[in-house]
Amino acid sequence: MAFRTGISRRMMMRSGFGLRSMSSWWGSVEPAAKDPILGVTEAFLADPSPDKVNVGVGAYRDDNGKPVVLECVREAERRIAGKLNMEYLPMGGSVNMVEETLKLAYGENSEFIKDKRIAAVQALSGTGACRLFADFQKRFRPDSQIYIPVPTWANHHNIWRDAQVPQRTFHYYHPETKGLDFASLMDDVKNAPNGSFFLLHACAHNPTGVDPSEEQWKEISYQFKVKGHFAFFDMAYQGFASGDPERDAKSIKIFLEDGHLIGIAQSYAKNMGLYGQRVGCLSLLCEDEKQAVAVKSQLQQIARPMYSNPPVQGALIVSTILGDPELKKLWLKEVKVMADRIIGMRTALRENLEKLGSPLSWEHITNQIGMFCYSGLTPEQVDRMTNEFHIYMTRNGRISMAGITTGNVSYLANAIHEVSKSA
């Protein structure tokens, strides 16, 4: 049968028209820009130098520079091995995992958990939790925008951009003091339209390692109350920052005590080392149980066309650890070991720089907290670190403290001193 143009299918194929049409389907696709963090690791792996050091990776390493699997995780794996069927989890994920996760964020004896006022679903780690919320915000507050700190984890911008939520920024880091620009932050909070959405890092701010003090958190919470702003906390490092999960959730406790309805993205990538399991949770505190039921149902509906159901293995590991008193005690011990090692490396790096006679102040290294240190190095200085010393990091000067060991800290300090001493 001929087409209306009179050209037969066979003639089209002979002319090459069909082949040209098919080959052009993706002809306009250009290569995507490399991820600035993943690109660092690629360059590190390609470097043959025996002296190379990677302080760009956002994953914990031991003092030998090796990945770590926690003992509590191995024991949880042993307990669940062979007992797991392959059925789907509900769209909202593992009920046990979610319940234990909420206790970490809201408190073991939280009235909000007892009153069933929290809408919560298992998510694909912290990234997935943020994306679910961004889509939820777009769907139910379509005229809203999100205020994001400068700087922040680069993927935050991607998440809200792809959810088509307009973005604004607010001041956070002060380059001169290498600390918090609290005055400018508060001005931005006060000047934002009433009822604005703000993305806050609950602890161990990524990439700066700069957190507000308890008193500053109280002032931020107060001003949010005055303005009617909504706080969405990304809590990727609970327990991993200070070694104490309760202390690391202090910002959230302050907001809860002040009567805010908040949102939280939680992740077990860092604090349990479950990077590849993609275990996380999104929760929204609601006015009452009825509202929480409605919100949870909508979160599940958003997840349905994305990935339908979350994975089960990581959720079982988490619920097994947190649901068993002895395993939880072991986890608390191990997460403190990780946090203490990073804190120790901060002290060692600062001391090595000071012993070299650096004319600069390096107090910010120990004042900051968490996996990352915002070193203050310029992009040009970072380039010299890589080209002259084979040290790999992102060009914003962010150092992953997990990549520092007792074996390379003096080498790293010397390189930093060499590229910064004429600054």
Image (cartoon, grey):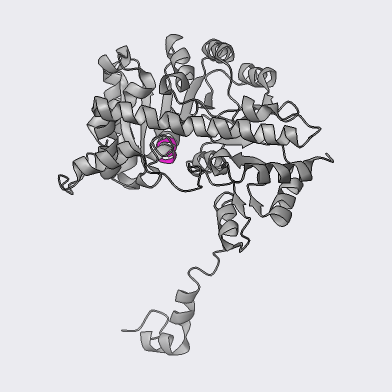
Quadrant in the picture for the C terminus: top right
Q: Nearer the viewer, residue 31 or 196?
A: 31
Q: Which contiguous range is marked in magenta?
A: 127-131
In the shown orientation, is residue 416 left or right of residue 164? Answer: right
**Visible in this render: residue 408?**
yes
- Which x, y percent locates residue 365? 65, 30
**Residue ID at (35%, 15%):** 287
In this rendering, the answer to whether 421 lies above or below 196 is below
- Which x, y percent locates residue 37? 57, 49
Q: What main secondary structure does the magenta stretch of the protein show?
A: helix
Q: Nearer the viewer, residue 32 or 400?
A: 400
Q: Nearer the viewer, residue 278 or 116?
A: 278
Total labels drawn: 0
In the shown orientation, is residue 102 left or right of residue 41? Answer: left
Q: Nearer the viewer, residue 230 or 410?
A: 410
In this rendering, the answer to whether 31 lies above or below 154 is below
**Residue ID at (41%, 31%):** 335
- Which x, y percent locates residue 148? 58, 31
Quadrant in the picture for the N terminus: bottom left
